[in-house]
Image (cartoon, grey):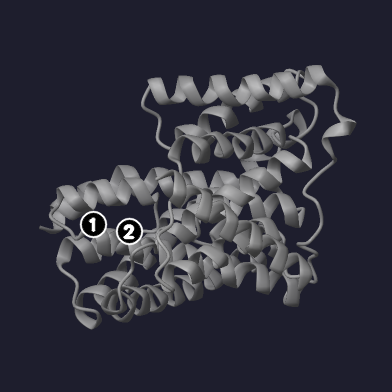
């Protein structure tokens, strides 16, 4: 296990260096992701350490929570109409994704249904396994969805909106006082532990987010975590997506990876339609709308929102709404359909 972790870290560092050298966007996120993916496809056995990954996610939770200020809270009612589109997006995703995965790709009903739901990976794996689905297929299909969305969106932001995704995601640590850094660290750890104890989904992000938001509204936290912390979070989140393909066989590449790419393309097209509707209705600017409706992972979209200079709270509120709807409604809908 230790050897796999060290190999994974070495591969990921090479990925960051390659992305930096080529001036490609999001080097700390996409560099490890694609380096680990390439290594996995070449047969290298990789691994990620869950406690460290969760600890890195707390940094993003604090970063998003620190973005929630009194001025922003006053803008929340204006998000109402935009948020009403979230359940419609999920309905469209299910109506389009399930027949594709079931009829075209030939997966069983449980696997097709829970793979079609753009929700939290761990939750969909749990629900899918309980319903009799194929856990390996679910894992690779969802990983491929996140992989493709995380690939498409940065390219779109760079080429269509001239966003610079190579910049540092904030001020360096030397610009912060020790007290402010200590408060952020405490908010991350305490929020994570409390949320985990009460059984909140996505505890490593949402717990710190909620606690940091409360501290931000109280004036205790006045800035996001330093750039180095957010870059570290990007690094390990990129690793997590890439190592999902560790041990993948040629047969799995032919079936799961190809099916996942097709499904991700369907979701990307739907997301583009809904983002365009938001823009045409004057509910949000294009950058915010794209990131809010892109069906990637919550952590990955948070990173992009921070680096791209989008309205982080707007983006994350939409993703949290999507995930809450999927987790609460998907098992009920599947039982009803059966």
Q: Quadrant of residue 143?
A: bottom left
Q: Quadrant of the N terminus?
A: top left
Residue under circle 1?
Answer: 135
| Residue 216 can be seen in this image | yes
Label 2: how many Cα within 10 Å (few below 14, some 14–19, many 20+): some
Relative vertical location of residue 190 with respect to residue 154 in this rendering, above or below: above
Residue 175 as seen in the image, left or right of residue 100: right
Residue 309 position, x and y percent, is: 77, 53
Disc 2 secondary structure class: helix
Q: In percent of the image, x 54 and y 23: which residue is there?
A: 191
Residue under the point 40% across and 35% down: 201
Quadrant containing the C terminus in the rendered view = bottom left
Quadrant in the picture for residue 294: bottom right
Residue for badge 2: 139
Do callouts 1 and 2 mark residues in contact (Cβ within 8 Å)?
yes
Q: Nearer the viewer, residue 337 or 22?
A: 22
**What residue is shown at x 23% (from left), y 48% (from top)?**
127
**Residue lying furthest left:** 338
Residue at the right extreme, as displayed: 175
Graded by Cα atoms within 10 Å as few (under 14), some (14 to 19) or many (20 or more), the crowding at tag 1 reads: some
In the rendering, at what x and y percent does residue 123 appear?
Answer: 32, 45
Residue found farthest to the front? 3
Q: Position of residue 168 (x, y in %)?
A: 80, 51
Q: CA distance from mark 1 to mark 2?
A: 6 Å
Q: Residue 251: horizontal and vertical position, in percent?
A: 26, 78
- Residue 99 appears left or right of 230: left
Q: Which mark is residue 228?
A: none
Vertically, is 263 above or below 246? below
């Amino acid at each position: 296990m230790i050897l796999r972790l060290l190999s994974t870290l070495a591969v990921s560092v090479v990925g960051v260096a390659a992305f930096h050298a080529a001036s490609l966007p999001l080097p700390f996120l996409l560099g490890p992701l694609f380096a680990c993916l390439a290594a996995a496809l070449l047969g290298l056995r990789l691994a990620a350490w869950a406690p460290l990954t969760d600890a890195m996610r707390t940094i993003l939770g604090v970063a998003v929570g620190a973005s929630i200020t009194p001025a922003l809270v006053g803008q929340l009612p204006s998000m109402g109409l935009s948020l009403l589109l979230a359940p419609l997006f999920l309905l469209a995703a299910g109506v389009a994704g399930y027949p594709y995965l079931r009829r075209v790709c030939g997966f069983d009903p449980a696997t097709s249904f829970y793979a079609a739901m753009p929700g939290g990976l761990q939750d969909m794996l749990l629900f899918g396994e309980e319903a009799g689905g194929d856990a390996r297929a679910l894992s690779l299909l969802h990983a491929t969805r996140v992989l493709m969305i995380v690939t498409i969106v940065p390219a779109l932001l760079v080429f269509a909106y001239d966003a610079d995704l190579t910049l540092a995601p904030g001020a360096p640590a030397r610009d912060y006082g020790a007290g402010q850094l200590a408060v952020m660290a405490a908010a991350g750890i305490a929020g994570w532990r409390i949320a985990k104890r009460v059984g909140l989904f996505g505890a490593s992000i949402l717990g710190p987010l909620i606690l940091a938001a409360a501290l931000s509204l109280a004036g205790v936290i006045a800035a996001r975590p330093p750039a180095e912390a957010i870059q570290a979070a990007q690094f390990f989140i990129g690793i997590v997506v890439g190592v999902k393909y560790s041990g993948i066989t040629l047969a799995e590449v032919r079936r799961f990876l190809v099916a996942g790419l097709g499904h991700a393309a369907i979701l990307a097209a739907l997301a583009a339609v809904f983002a365009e509707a938001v823009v045409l209705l004057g509910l949000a600017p294009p950058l915010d709308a794209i990131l809010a409706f892109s069906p990637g992972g919550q952590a990955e979209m948070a990173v992009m929102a921070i680096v791209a200079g989008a309205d982080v709270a707007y983006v994350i509120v939409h993703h949290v709404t999507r995930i809450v709807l999927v987790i609460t409604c998907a098992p009920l809908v599947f039982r009803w359909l059966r």
